[in-house]
Every structure is written in structure tokens, then in C-alpha cells.
Image (cartoon, rainbow, N blue to C red):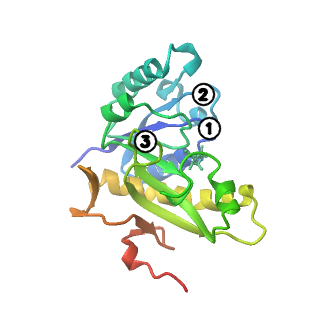
């Protein structure tokens, strides 16, 4: 029997994606344990979701520079001996040193259909551009911001009258099943980064997996797009 996967979570804010993973673990839907929650914001609500001994939070202001902060963060993460590191609303850019230290183990959930709308204010920018469709992506992290291989995406419609807030809420609803389904594939060993490519069930993934209405991730060609 294999042991449950050890997951470290990096979070800066509310922690609803972390809560989704915790709920799935409690419900026996994710064969994993959260081994630490790491934050650049000591007041982040996400930290409250785990017992004190699993929390690490430091202010970057207390470090000389980005490298020094990333080194301390990386040492703390490494000490938790994670199999996977999930950035779930971690709003600080991770430097190349951190990223290469955990290459292939480090994923991020981002609120847009990458490669569209990297960076901040994704919902407002999608609305300004007149998009009909928006969503979220889970990707492997590389030093360039939001540029790593995308593993999976979930799409939502943009509706007439949407504001950045209503659109963000609709995207967040699909972020939770998207992150859970992707993490389940990772811990099951079904998805891995192999060199420059993502492999799914041993085959190169040519485009992101898509979340279907049943909360399952399927290859894009298996999802029919309404016209
Ligand atoms: C989520 O919408 C996540 O996609 C986004 O922050 C929110 C965190 O929510 N992440 C980014 O914007 C990263 N660039 P949560 O704290 O409730 O999980």
C-alpha cells in the first residue's frame, strides 16, 4: 500500500482552495495530508484552517531581498517533506531559485484561461476585452509568471451584466473542483512533468485537460463545445 501524499500549500489570503483540499481529505476523496501552510502574509485567513504547528508565515519585509525570503520559505517547505506544493492564492512571485528547487512538484491555480490574462486583475481584464468565456487554470510553475505547462482548465461563461466580482465568484466555483481533480491526478501519479511536456497516463498532453460537468478531467477532444 502506498502512503498518502504529502501536500504543502502556499497561500496569501482567504484559503477557500485550501479548504476544498482539506474537505476532500476529510471526506476520503483525496489520498493526501496537508503537511504545512506557508504564507507571505502573517494575517492570511488561510493559516487559520490548519493547526498552529502546520503554519509558517513571515513578512517579506523582514528579509533583505527576494532571494533571502525565498530561501527561508524554501527551507521551511523542504522541512515539511512535501511530495507536492500547491500555490492556492499565493500572491507573491516565486524566484527562480525556489522554482528550480521544487521543479516538477510545484503547481499553481490561476484565475484565467492561460495563456490569456497572466498576472493580476484577470476578471476585470477579461470583461474589458469582451470575452464570452473565462475560467481557471492549474499549471506547473516556472520562473516566468503564470507561464508553465497548463495541466487542466475549467471554463465558465461570461454573462451580460457581469462585474469583476460576479465573474470572480463564478470562476471560484469551478476553481475548487478543478484544483481537487488535478491534485487527485497528481497524487495518483497520472500526471507528471516530463521535460518540457506534461504527461497524462503516460502520454504527452497536447492541450490542457478540461473539467466536465461531472467534475472529471478529460482530454479536450472528449468535451463537446456547444455552438
Ligand atoms: C483564487 O481565485 C486563485 O485562483 C487566485 O487567488 C484566489 C485565492 O482564493 N490566485 C491568483 O490570482 C494567483 N495569481 P482562495 O484564497 O480563496 O483560495
Looking at the image, which residue is at 53% across and 50% down?
118
- Which mark sits nearer the N-terminus, 3 or 2? 2
- 201 relative to 193, above or below: below
Q: Quadrant of the C terminus?
A: bottom right
Circles 2 and 1 in contact, beta carbons < 8 Å: yes
Circles 3 and 1 in contact, beta carbons < 8 Å: no
Q: Residue lying at the far front in this picture: please name it.
A: 129
Closer to the camera in the image, 209 or 82: 209
For label 1, being within 8 Å of ligand 1 is answered yes
In the rendered structure, the answer to whether residue 27 lies left or right of residue 15 reads left
Q: Residue lying at the far right in this picture: please name it.
A: 161
Q: Quadrant of residue 133?
A: bottom right
For label 3, being within 8 Å of ligand 1 is answered no
Looking at the image, which residue is at 72% across and 56% down?
164
Q: Position of residue 217 (x, y in %)?
A: 41, 67
In the rendered structure, the answer to whether residue 197 lies left or right of residue 122 reads left
Circles 3 and 2 in contact, beta carbons < 8 Å: no
- Which mark sits nearer the N-terminus, 3 or 1? 1
Q: Which residue is mark 1?
A: 13
Q: Which residue is mark 2?
A: 41
Of circles 3 and 1, which is in front?
3
- 192 relative to 202, above or below: above
- Which mark sits nearer the N-terminus, 2 or 1? 1
Residue 201 visible (yes or no): no
Q: Secondary structure at mark 3?
A: loop
Of circles 3 and 2, which is in front?
3
Residue 144's tag is: 3
Amino acid at each position: 500500500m502506498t502512503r498518502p501524499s504529502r501536500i504543502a500549500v502556499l497561500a496569501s489570503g482567504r484559503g477557500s482552495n485550501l479548504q476544498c483540499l482539506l474537505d476532500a481529505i476529510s471526506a476520503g476523496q483525496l489520498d493526501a495530508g496537508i503537511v504545512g501552510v506557508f504564507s507571505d502574509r502573517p494575517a492570511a485567513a488561510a493559516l487559520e484552517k490548519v493547526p498552529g504547528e502546520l503554519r509558517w508565515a513571515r513578512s517579506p519585509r523582514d528579509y533583505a531581498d527576494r532571494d533571502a525570503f525565498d530561501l527561508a520559505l524554501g527551507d521551511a517547505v523542504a522541512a515539511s517533506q512535501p511530495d507536492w506544493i500547491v500555490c492556492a492564492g499565493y500572491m507573491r512571485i516565486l524566484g527562480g531559485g525556489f522554482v528550480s528547487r521544487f521543479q516538477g512538484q510545484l503547481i499553481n491555480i490561476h484565475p484565467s484561461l492561460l495563456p490569456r490574462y497572466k498576472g493580476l486583475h484577470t476578471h476585470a481584464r477579461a470583461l474589458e476585452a469582451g470575452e464570452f468565456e473565462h475560467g481557471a487554470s492549474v499549471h506547473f510553475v516556472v520562473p516566468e509568471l503564470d507561464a508553465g505547462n497548463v495541466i487542466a482548465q475549467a471554463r465558465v461563461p461570461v454573462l451580460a451584466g457581469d462585474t469583476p466580482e460576479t465573474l470572480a465568484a463564478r470562476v471560484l466555483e469551478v476553481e475548487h473542483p478543478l484544483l481537487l481533480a488535478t491534485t487527485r491526478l497528481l497524487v495518483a501519479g497520472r500526471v507528471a512533468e516530463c521535460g518540457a511536456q506534461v504527461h497524462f497516463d503516460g502520454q504527452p498532453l497536447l492541450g490542457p485537460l478540461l473539467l466536465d460537468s461531472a467534475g472529471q478531467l478529460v482530454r479536450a477532444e472528449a468535451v463537446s463545445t456547444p455552438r
